[in-house]
Structures are given as C-alpha cells and as structure tokens.
Amino acid sequence: MDVPVYNMNGQSVGAMTIDEQSLGGTVNPALIKQAYVMYHANLRQGSSRTRNRHEVSGSGKKLYKQKGTGRARHGDRQVPTFRGGGHAFAKRRTREDYRLGMPKKMRRKANRNALLAKLIDNEVRVVDGLVFAEPRTRDFVNLIAGLGLDKRALVALSSDAEKSRNARLSGRNVENVTLCRADQLTCFELLNHRYLVIDRADLEAWLNGPSSQTNKQAKIEPMGRVKVGGEAA
C-alpha cells in the first residue's frame, strides 16, 4: 500500500510504502471493538458508590414511641425500608471493578488493525518533517487546512519532548485537534478521531517498534523454562 507523504504546506512530496500484512492484512472489527471497550473501561475513575444507613444524612431520633401506636416498630428514618434511606448492601466501586484485560498480542494487533482501517479509508496524513520553528497557532491551523482536514484530527507527535515542544504549544488550543505521543498510539485514540496526522519518521518507528511484534512466540521447554539466546534458562 502506497501512502502519500506531504510537507508542512500540505503539498504531496512522495509516497510511503506500508505492508498491509504487517497490519493484519484485513480489518477485524470484532478485535478492534474488544480492544476499544477495554481501553474505554480502563479510563473509568472507579469512584461510584452508594450510601448505607449510617452514611445517609438525617436525624437519628426515633420516629415514634415503641409501643401504643399500633404501627410497626421503627428507629430512625435512614433504614432501607424508607424512601431516601440507605442501601441495605451499599456498593463501593474501585477502578479494579471496571478494569478489563486483553492479551498483549491481541492489543498490539488491534492497534495495528485500526491503523489499517484508517489507511484503507484514506484518513491518514503522513507529514515529512512535522516540526515547527517556533510556537505559533496560526502555522498549526494552516497545516491542518493545507491537509484538507475538516473533521476531528489526532496529531501524533514525537516522544522527544524537546523536539515536539513547539508543535505541542502551537496545537494545544486548536479546535477539533487532539495531541498525543506517537509511541502511545492506540486504537482507542484512532477511532475517536476521523483523521490521523503523523510524522513519517514516527510512523516508521511505530511500525518497527514493539507493536509490530505480534507473531513472536516464546520457546517453551518441556519443564516450562523459557529459552534465552537459544539455550535453556
């Protein structure tokens, strides 16, 4: 697959060849959805809770005398049988209650599969040298306009803080633009935005990085020991 490469003015200056098989070959919607749900669930704060009868605000005074009224015996109004009272079995949620897991190989394949879907839909803009000489929002807006992006865009910047400093300062206040690190690109971020803008060098590093190691298998000995360097550990 040949992907056009643009300069900072939005002009096409060449093409970049990407192997579709390294991204999974075909798009697997079920795998991408599973990864998306996992990333979304793991963002939950996990602070939801309900109050028991001791945590509900109100007086602890006995409602009426114990005997002589003909009514059922009651103490205070915070019991679960009354409207506005506490829960009988109050739930205290934590982040671990919502946390989902997924094997590393599946996560990496889902991330690469999401990128493949973006490439097929022509929603990836590869820029040759995504660097700004100085922090200026106008230059960033001109870049987005030159690339023809009319929807939400995800701009993946270099993980080098010094190298991407001007780009971060230029694009942090631009409407419909989200900034992220190129080495932390996930299917969750890709699917939440229509377009992806990334530097050519950062894309090559991402394709050749840990996310590409989807087919590696550990060499397991009969006793469960893993071979390291071709010899038994």
Image: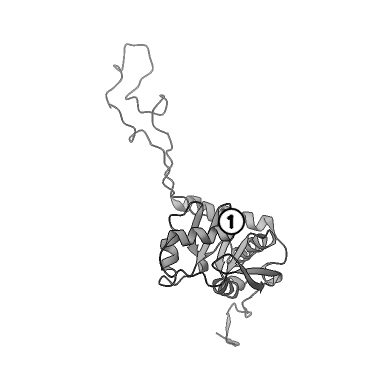
Q: Nearer the viewer, residue 99 or 19?
A: 19
Task: Name the residue at 61% across, 77% down.
Answer: 218
Task: Name the residue at 58% across, 66% down.
Answer: 104
Q: Please tell me in which quadrant of the rendered image residue 227 appears.
A: bottom right
Q: Nearer the viewer, residue 102 or 16?
A: 16
Specify the quadrant that holds the C terminus.
bottom right
Q: Is residue 101 visible?
A: no
Q: Is residue 14 left or right of residue 178?
A: right
Residue 190, placed above or below residue 201 = above
Q: Please tell me in which quadrant of the rendered image residue 85 appears.
A: top left
Colouring mode (rainbow / by chain / secondary structure / one colour): one colour
Residue 90, placed above or below residue 184 = above
Q: Is residue 198 visible?
A: yes
Residue 144: x %, y % from top left: 54, 59
Residue position for label 1: 149
Residue 124, placed above or below residue 19 = above
- Category of crowding for the residue at label 1, using alpha-carbon neighbours closer than 10 angstroms: few (below 14), some (14–19), many (at least 20): some
Specify the quadrant that holds the N terminus.
bottom right
Residue type, label 1: Leu
Q: Is residue 221 left or right of residue 176?
A: right
Residue 169: x %, y % from top left: 41, 62
Residue 155: x %, y % from top left: 52, 61
Residue 122: x %, y % from top left: 67, 60
Report the number of numbered marks: 1
Q: Is residue 166 left or right of residue 146?
A: left
Disc 1 secondary structure class: loop
